[in-house]
Amino acid sequence: HSMLIIRLFGIIFPVFAIVAVGYLYSRWRQPDMTAANHINMTVLLPALIFHVLSGKDFQLAEYGWLALGGIAVVLGSGLLALVAARVARLSLKTFVPPMMFTNSGNMGLPLAVFAFGEQALPAAVVLFIIENGLHFTLGTWIMDHRAHWLDVLRQPIVIATLAGIAFASTGWVMP
C-alpha cells in the first residue's frame, strides 16, 4: 500500500512541482507568456507530434481502438455536458467545451511518460491528437458555426498531425 503511494507521488509530484514553480514565478515576475505560448503551439507541439508519428517504431494501426476510445470519451463527455447544461440552463458555449476538452498535452503527456515510461509516449500522443483534432474541428464549430474548415487545416498542430500520419502510413522515415 505504501509502495503504491510512493509510486503515485513519484509520477504526479514532478508535474505539480513544475506547475507550482511556474505559478509562483508568475506571481512574482508576472511574465508575458504570449511568445512562449505561441512558440509552444506553433513549433514545439507540432514538432513533438510529427516526431512521434513519423518515427520508425510508430505503427498507426496499433492505435485504432485507442483512438476510437478517445473519440468516445470526448464525445460522450460532450453529450453528458450538453444534457447537464440544458437541465441547469447554462450557456452551451461556456459549459460544454471545457467538459469535453482537457489539457491532455501539457499535463497529460508528461504524466503518461512519468507513469508508464517513454514507451507510452506514442499512445499518449494519439490521445492528444484525437482530443486536439476534435477541439480544433468540433470545438471550433461549437463556438462558431460559421467557422471555415480551411482555417482548421492551417493550424500547425493539424499540419504536423497530417504529415506525421502520412509518414506513418507510407513507411517513410525521417533521417
Image (cartoon, rainbow, N blue to C red):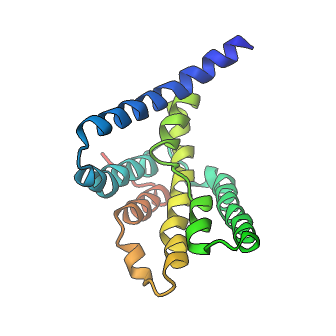
Q: Please give left or right for residue 113 compared with residue 156 in the image.
A: right
User: What x and y, as percent, mark residue 17?
Assistant: 44, 27
Q: Please give left or right for residue 86 compared with residue 123 in the image.
A: right
Query: Which residue sits at x=53%, y=70%?
Result: 139
**Position of 122 relative to 35 (above/below):** above
The image quadrant that residue 73 belongs to is bottom right
**Position of 142 relative to 10 (above/below):** below
Callout count:
0
Query: Which residue sits at x=36%, y=55%?
Result: 46
User: What x and y, as percent, mark residue 47?
Assistant: 34, 51
User: What x and y, as percent, mark residue 112?
Assistant: 55, 36
Q: Extreme bottom residue here? A: 146
Q: Please give left or right for residue 75 compared with residue 118 in the image.
A: right
Q: Extreme top residue here? A: 2
Which quarter of the rendered picture does the C terminus lie within?
top left
Instruction: Pick the residue in front: 127 or 174.
Output: 127
**Position of 51 relative to 69 (above/below):** above
Instruction: Pick the residue in front: 152 or 173.
Output: 152
User: What x and y, as percent, mark residue 152?
Assistant: 42, 74
Which quarter of the rendered picture does the N terminus lie within?
top right
Query: Which residue sits at x=70%, y=12%?
Result: 2
